Image (tube, rainbow, N blue to C red):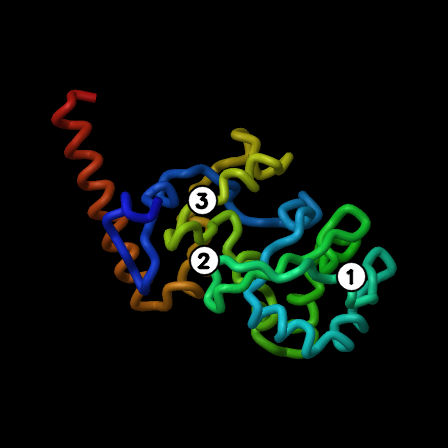
């Protein structure tokens, strides 16, 4: 899949679909109660180990809709080359949602970091941070399969922005400041080429 994309930044191929795919202007868990987290997520083995290293702290911030039995938090590890360590570990579901999602739709991992005055994404798995983006076969693209399951974000009437516009912070987190400069330049080049192509075709 990634071989068909011409641009690579910081080791990731860039799918131009991120520039055009429609999405809600910003995430608001008060609207959807964290619906994108209902299905759990795959974590890198290193992320899994970091979470388990502070498991008692995490338990102290969970509510009674969650389980504090940490043996029920994760699935068995599996090989996956899209993860830095080559090993992915999925989070389990409990009460119909990710074990780390509380009854208000907030991620306990992010909540713990903020309660402790740490960077908000310190313990949060990368794939949670990036949604609706995903790294697939070495490319940054749109997680359209997951997006299609959602009742709010997938509705055309609610999609008044693009994934690129609403995920600036997430993209910079992944690519760094210099990577974002390069991504912005590529975006301009992409649209210039598209406009030129449309002009030649008369559309």
Q: Do the residues under discs 3 and 1 have CB atoms within 8 angstroms?
A: no
Q: Quadrant of the N terminus?
A: top left
The x and y percentages for residue 34 are 67, 49
Who is closer to the viewer here, 166 or 11?
Answer: 11
Q: Residue furthest left?
A: 200
Picture quarter with the C terminus = top left
- Where is 169 relative to 20, above or below? below
Whole-percent x and y of residue 190? 23, 44
Q: Which residue is mark 2?
A: 82
Instruction: Return the mark for residue 91.
Output: none
The circle drawn on residue 72 is: 1
Q: Is residue 159 left or right of residue 96?
A: left
Badge 1: few (under 14), some or many (20 or more) residues near its Cα, within 10 Å? few
Q: Decide which of 177, 65 is in the foreground and name it.
A: 65
For this rendering, which residue is in front, 136 or 179? 136
Lower sequence index among marks 3 and 1: 1
Q: Is residue 90 above or below residue 117?
A: above
Distance from disc 2 to disc 1, alpha carbons, whole Å, reads: 24 Å
Tell me which residue sits at (64%, 35%) in the image: 151
Asked which secondary structure carries label 1, the reply is helix
Instruction: Please indicate whether residue 133 sits to the left or right of residue 47 in the image.
Output: left
Image quarter of residue 112: bottom right
**Circle 3 or circle 2, nearest the eye:** 2
Task: Find residue 178 and report its horizontal and vertical position in percent.
Answer: 30, 68
Please rate how many residues cluster around mark 2, counting C-alpha atoms within 10 Å: few if below 14, some from 14 to 19, many from 20.
some
Mark before the other along the chain sequence, 2 or 1: 1
Name the residue located 50 percent from the left edge and 56 percent from the top edge. Answer: 130
Number of numbered markers: 3
Element type where label 2 sits in the image: loop
Q: Label 1 near label 2: C-beta < 8 Å?
A: no
Which residue in the structure is indicated by mark 3? 142
């Amino acid at each position: 899949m990634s071989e068909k994309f011409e641009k690579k930044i910081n080791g990731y191929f860039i799918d131009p679909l991120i520039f055009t795919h429609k999405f809600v202007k910003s995430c608001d868990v008060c609207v959807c109660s964290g619906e994108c987290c209902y299905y759990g997520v795959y974590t890198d083995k290193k992320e899994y180990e970091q979470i388990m290293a502070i498991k008692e702290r995490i338990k102290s911030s969970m509510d009674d809709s969650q389980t504090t039995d940490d043996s029920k938090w994760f699935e068995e590890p599996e090989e996956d080359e899209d993860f830095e360590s080559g090993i992915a570990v999925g989070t389990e579901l409990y009460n119909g949602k990710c074990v780390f999602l509380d009854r208000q739709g907030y991620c306990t991992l992010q909540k713990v970091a903020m309660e402790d005055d740490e960077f908000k994404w310190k313990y949060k798995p990368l794939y949670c941070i990036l949604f609706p983006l995903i790294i697939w076969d070495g490319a940054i693209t749109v997680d359209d399969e997951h997006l299609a399951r959602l009742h709010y974000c997938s509705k055309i009437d609610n999609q008044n922005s693009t994934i690129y516009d609403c995920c600036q912070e997430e993209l910079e987190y992944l690519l760094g400041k210099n990577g974002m400069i390069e991504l912005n330049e590529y975006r301009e080049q992409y649209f210039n080429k598209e406009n030129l192509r449309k002009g030649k075709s008369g559309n």
